[in-house]
Image: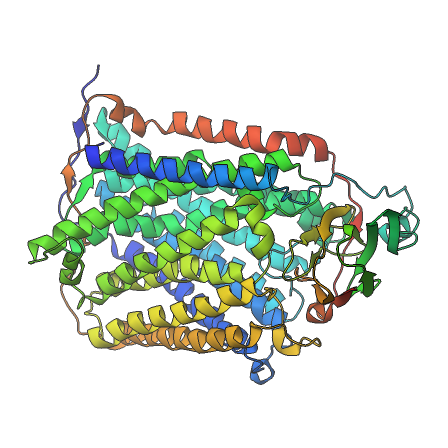
């Protein structure tokens, strides 16, 4: 390799390394995490996935629960082609944990304008955290194709 | 230290007529698939501006049926057909040696039969599962079976290439593999290893399940095997185009490629770093955060060979432009032979590819992916890469390749030139729309024109850009089919032409470390070890699979 090739290679490598450092900083210092929950839904022999989900806490009673001072957990079931519950009411500034699972196919769980964006895979429980600072209505969308009426699959998050 | 001799192929390759016909027919299957795919693409682009023209498409029932056809025909049939035809030819040219006609015919037959099976499934409405076919969405078995045959056609092509290469090596012991043959071989070795994931997914899990032999499947395992192949597949789209950029474009602009070794290193880097598909699964449950970060690091490493390509190819262009009066630090760029449609299409592709690379790096950027995952930012990105850097470059290649194969002159350089510019302007407007829409939260793979909720701010203008740009891309693509069709039917007959094939400023080294670049088995070993390191922990945790999901056919 010639001199200019080596210089170009070195500049490229340094640039990419700096980018990676920035991402690591955002992850560690700024706490921007990827949803990487390892929790699963246990399906017993002879049981189907839907009934397993409906008998597994917290999905036996989906909805919003207060878990501490200013802390809330939102447990959501995704099913073609709706979310249950489809209206989620939360106070502004609260620390919110979303736990989501699917009873049929792969869905998405996405609130535009936030960092709430995760895949919902049958048999797995997706978990993410967020704090809504702004009052108002947020759109919750399925952003993974899930069949004929996929574009209708949405819900509302009301932050008061 | 042994001294290797350098093989200089004779100037002119004369393929037997049967092989020339088969290569041409393989390409035409790809172009036909592209035409059908692009027709659906137009309807999708208009959908973002709330114009629903799907209802006028014969036989098409839903947006998602059209989207499946668009993805499968454009991203799989078109690209694979081009690779099978073009890389077979570059191998033959690199070694100045003919191929095996029977294997060329078998690969062609497999491709056609496979395409017919998937086409049946898609057009009959039994396979609206998109080209990623995530289980437990369950298509008719003919869909998966057709895809398997299409992949088998690439394997048959590999056998053809490797037999040709090993016969050459037996006759030329101790010689460096000619550059063109080397990069052709690496492209297919790379793909053969990469395709294992999708092969296992389909043959072991999905096909038996879609045939009803087993009732359930493991969606996360299937999806992970899909992406094991699904990311490297994009380099299988790209590498045949890199062959053209490295080995042909320099000649076409009257320049030279500078370094033989850098090109080999670039291709080997792609071969070594296969297992990065988990960056498509950054937001998946069931995959640990540290595996995702390691994947991000490896993904960034794969950006290096593309940066090197930008350097080497630009330098080759600059050599050519300066020979033709090019001056200045960047002004030489205007002295390229812009009146040659083959050059114009491919140089425009390269410029668009820079934007594609930057947006790709954003997608790959670990937690930044939270902002863009499954939004229209992603198709905005990949219409700059596969949709233009690959597709428009293939059109550019076709402007010399079809005349070469047909012994006819290109019909209308003016149309071909206009085609390249219209398509490029189109994709820039289109991608502007999709990328801004994605940043405003517009989900991808969604029939936006039918969505029941009020559109958030920013979607409307994004949709208009998408529709306008997509329409221009459609016009550009249709002009390509006119040029190619008229060339085949009415092009002026001419003497067999020569394949444009560049010289390098630096010949391949005969001694030293560079000789070991040709020892593919070492590089294959590195590739396999890295795959085991990256996927071993996941597979160990997920085999035996947890088959919890039954099939879903609500499409």
Among the 4 quarters of the image, the one containing residue B162: top left
Quadrant housing the C terminus of chain B: bottom right
Left or right of B516 on screen, residue B301: right
Q: Quadrant of the N terminus of chain B?
A: top left
User: Residue B508 occupies which quadrant of the picture?
Assistant: top left
Q: Which residue is painted at 25% across and 26% down in the image?
A: B514
The color scheme shown is rainbow
Front residue of B158/A90: it is A90
Q: Position of residue B305 (x, y in %)?
A: 35, 41
* As drawn, A81 above or below B160: below
Most distant residue in the bottom direction: B56
Position of residue B169 measured from the top left corner of the image (x, y, whole percent): 27, 30
Q: Nearer the viewer, residue B205 or B299?
A: B299
Q: Is residue B108 left or right of residue A54?
A: left
The residue positioned farthest toward the top in the image shown: B1
The image shows residue B26, relative to residue B491, as above or below, that is above
Q: Residue at the location (38% across, 40% down)?
A: A15
Q: Is residue B534 left or right of residue B167?
A: right
Query: Looking at the image, which residue is at 33% across and 72% down?
Result: B480
Residue B314 point in image, percent of width and height: 23, 50
Q: At which x and y percent is residue B532?
A: 56, 29
């Amino acid at each position: 390799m010639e001199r200019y090739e080596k210089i170009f290679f070195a500049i490229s490598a340094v640039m990419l390394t700096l980018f990676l450092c920035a991402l690591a900083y955002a992850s560690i210092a700024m706490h921007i995490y990827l949803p990487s929950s390892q929790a699963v839904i246990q399906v017993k022999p002879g049981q189907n996935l839907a009934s397993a989900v409906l008998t597994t806490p917290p999905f036996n009673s989906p909805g919003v629960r207060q878990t501490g001072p200013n802390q809330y957990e939102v447990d959501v079931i995704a099913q073609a082609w709706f979310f249950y519950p489809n209206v989620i009411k939360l106070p502004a500034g609260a620390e919110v944990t979303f736990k989501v699972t699917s009873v049929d196919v792969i869905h998405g769980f996405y609130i535009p304008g936030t960092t709430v964006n995760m895949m919902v895979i049958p048999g797995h429980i997706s978990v993410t955290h967020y704090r809504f600072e702004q009052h108002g209505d947020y759109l919750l969308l399925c952003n993974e194709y899930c069949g004929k009426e996929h574009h209708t699959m949405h819900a509302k998050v009301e932050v008061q | 230290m042994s001294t290797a001799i350098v093989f200089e192929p004779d100037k002119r390759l004369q393929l037997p007529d049967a092989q020339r016909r088969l290569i041409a027919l393989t390409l035409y299957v790809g172009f036909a698939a592209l035409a059908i795919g692009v027709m659906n693409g137009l309807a999708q682009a208009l959908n973002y501006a709330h114009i629903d023209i799907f209802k006028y498409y014969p036989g098409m029932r839903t947006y998602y049926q059209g989207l499946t056809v668009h993805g499968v025909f454009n991203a799989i049939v078109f690209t694979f057909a081009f690779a099978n035809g073009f890389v077979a030819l570059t191998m033959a040219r690199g070694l100045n040696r003919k191929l095996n006609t029977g294997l060329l015919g078998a690969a062609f037959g497999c491709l056609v039969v496979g395409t017919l099976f998937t086409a049946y499934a898609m057009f009959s409405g039994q396979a609206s599962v998109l080209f990623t076919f995530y289980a437990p969405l369950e298509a008719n078995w003919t869909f998966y079976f057709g895809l398997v045959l299409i992949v088998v056609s690439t394997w048959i092509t590999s056998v053809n290439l490797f037999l040709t290469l090993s016969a050459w090596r037996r006759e030329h012991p101790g010689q460096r593999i000619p550059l063109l043959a080397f990069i052709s071989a690496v492209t297919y070795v790379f793909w053969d290893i990469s395709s294992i994931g999708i092969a296992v997914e389909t043959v072991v899990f999905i096909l038996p399940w879609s045939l009803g032999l087993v009732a359930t499947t493991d969606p996360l395992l299937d999806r992970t095997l899909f992406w094991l192949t699904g990311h490297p597949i994009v380099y299988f789209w790209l590498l045949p185009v890199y062959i053209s950029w490295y080995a042909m474009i320099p000649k076409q602009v009257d320049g030279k490629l500078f370094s033989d070794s850098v090109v080999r290193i670039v291709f080997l880097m792609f071969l070594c770093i296969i297992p990065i598909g988990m960056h498509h699964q950054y937001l998946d449950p069931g995959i640990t955060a540290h595996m995702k970060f390691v994947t991000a690091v490896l993904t960034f490493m794969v950006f290096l060979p593309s940066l090197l390509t930008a350097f080497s190819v630009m330098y080759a262009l600059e050599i050519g432009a300066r020979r033709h009066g090019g001056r200045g630090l960047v002004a030489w760029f205007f002295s390229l032979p812009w009146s040659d449609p083959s050059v114009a299409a491919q140089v425009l592709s390269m410029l668009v590819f820079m934007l594609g690379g930057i947006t790709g790096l954003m997608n790959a950027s670990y937690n930044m992916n939270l902002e863009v995952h499954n939004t229209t930012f992603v198709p905005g990105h990949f219409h700059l890469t596969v949709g233009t850097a690959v597709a428009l470059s293939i059109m550019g290649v076709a402007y010399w390749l079809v005349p070469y194969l047909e012994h006819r002159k290109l019909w209308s350089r003016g149309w071909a030139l206009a085609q390249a510019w219209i398509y490029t302007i189109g994709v820039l407007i289109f991608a502007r729309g999709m990328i801004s829409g994605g940043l405003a939260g517009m989900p991808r793979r969604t029939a936006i024109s039918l969505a029941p909720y009020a559109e958030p701010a920013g979607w409307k203008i994004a949709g208009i850009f998408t529709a306008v740009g997509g329409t221009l891309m459609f016009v550009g693509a249709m002009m390509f089919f006119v040029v190619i069709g008229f060339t085949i039917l009415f092009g002026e007959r001419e003497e067999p032409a020569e394949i444009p094939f560049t010289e390098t400023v630096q010949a391949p080294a005969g001694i030293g470390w560079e000789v070991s670049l040709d020892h593919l088995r070492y590089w294959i070993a590195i590739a396999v070890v890295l795959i085991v390191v990256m996927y071993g922990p996941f597979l160990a945790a997920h085999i035996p699979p947890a088959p919890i999901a039954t099939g879903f056919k609500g499409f």
